Amino acid sequence: MNQFKEAMKVNKNKWSFYKTYEKRKDGRKIYKGSIVPEGELYTDYSLATVSCFVLNKKGEILVEERAADKKIMPGILDIVSGHIDGNETPTQAMIREYVEEIHKGSQEEQEKARNEAIHNLKKLDELHLICNEKGYYVQFYMLLTKLKTITKQSEEIKNVKWIPMEDLFEMIRQGKTGIVYDKRLEIVFRQVREGYQELVKGKWESNGIVRCSR
């Protein structure tokens, strides 16, 4: 119990690391729930991250080209993603990253983006992935955006572009993006397809609100 309490002491400026619950290939079972500071990451712990498929009405997904001077994945294509800070829930982190990465303009733009995410962000599956012998917990989301203005975070992102949904899924399968492919991602792809159809047909025209899970 004391060890668990120590693990839960996370400074607000630290990223979160969640202990996962899946069995790894070597047969060891690891459990989800504990959080440890960045400096105490072990192989049994996963870096906590969030990723969002931001779609427009055409069914295209917004893709970012990371800046060439980034230490992590320079020049790689990615969707709106980021780390969960130690004092955030995954949904709070996703709202923050959405505003920071592609709506870094005026205060009015930021507020519109934040309100859109709060009301329309849709929570998808979570996955626990292994990449370069490191564990990653990824909570996926999707968001059908109505905002026409995009102001990218220039120090982080070189360019943004819209790519047809199925084209992006195939790029992910072929390893052409920063998203680590796993067969379980096909479930997330299906959720994006179904969620898009639901939102467009059932929510878009009526301006309905899809409340996100917390």
Image (cartoon, helix red, strand yellow):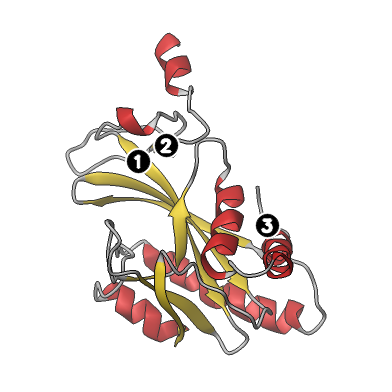
Q: Amino acid at mark 1?
A: Ser
- Label 3 sits on residue: 212
Q: Amino acid at mark 2?
A: Tyr
Crowd rating for badge 2 (residues with CA inside 10 Å; few <14, some 14–19, many 20+): many
Q: Quadrant of residue 135?
A: top left
- Label 2 sits on residue: 18
Quick check: marks 2 and 1 in contact, CB under 8 Å? yes
Quick check: marks 1 and 3 in contact, CB under 8 Å? no
Sequence-wise first label, 2 or 1: 2
Classify the position of the N terminus by image quarter: top left
Circle number at residue 46: 1
Sequence-wise first label, 3 or 2: 2
Q: Residue at x 43, y 39 (%)?
A: 15
77 left or right of 105 in image: left
CA–CA distance between discs 1 and 3?
A: 24 Å
Circle number at residue 177: none
What secondary structure is found at the residue carrying circle 1?
strand
What secondary structure is found at the residue carrying circle 3?
loop
Q: Is residue 147 above or below residue 94?
A: below
Q: Quadrant of residue 106?
A: bottom right
CA–CA distance between discs 2 and 1?
A: 5 Å
Quick check: marks 3 and 2 in contact, CB under 8 Å? no
CA–CA distance between discs 3 and 2?
A: 21 Å
Position of residue 114 measured from the top left corner of the image (x, y, whole percent): 69, 61
Q: Residue at x 63, y 80 (%)?
A: 149
Q: Residue at x 40, y 37 (%)?
A: 17
Q: Residue at x 26, y 75 (%)?
A: 176
What secondary structure is found at the residue carrying circle 2?
strand
